[in-house]
Image: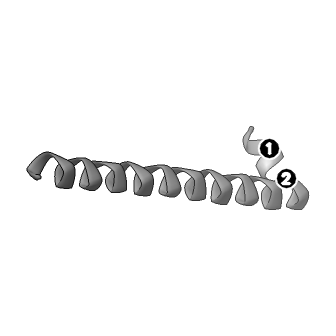
Amino acid sequence: MDTLAFTPINGSMMATIILGVIAVVGVAVGTMFRQRRDAKKKGER
């Protein structure tokens, strides 16, 4: 794994994959927080 990361092509691919994963996780967390807020609003009323 370490030797592959040193090649430029794999390095850029790894960066793209990591950015993609971070974006997906961010969206998932955002939707979770939104659902929790909506549930709290519905629960109060």
Q: How many marks?
A: 2
Picture coordinates of residue 38, whole percent (x, y): 28, 54
Residue under the point 24% across and 47% down? 39
| Element class at badge 1 | helix
The answer to which of 33 and 14 lies nearer the viewer is: 33
Residue 42 or residue 32, whichever sits in front: 42
Residue 18 location, quadrant: bottom right
Label 2 neighbour load within 10 Å: few <14, some 14-19, many 20+: few
> In the image, 14: left or right of 7?
left
Residue 7 locus on image (x, y percent): 87, 55
Instruction: Check the image and name the residue furthest to the front.
Output: 45
Residue 1 vs 35, above or below: the answer is: above
Check disc 1 and give the amino acid type.
Answer: Thr
Q: Which mark is residue 30?
A: none
Q: Which mark is residue 10?
A: 2
Front-lying residue, 28 or 37: 37
Who's the residue at 19% across and 55% down the image? Answer: 41
Image side of residue 38 versus residue 11, left or right = left
Between marks 2 and 1 in the image, the one whose residue lies nearer the viewer: 2
Kind of element beneath mark 2: helix
Q: Residue at x 9, y 51 (%)?
A: 44
The residue pinned by badge 1 equals: 3
Amino acid at circle 2: Asn
- Image coordinates for residue 43, horizontal then vertical, percent: 14, 46
Labels 2 and 1 touching (C-beta < 8 A): no
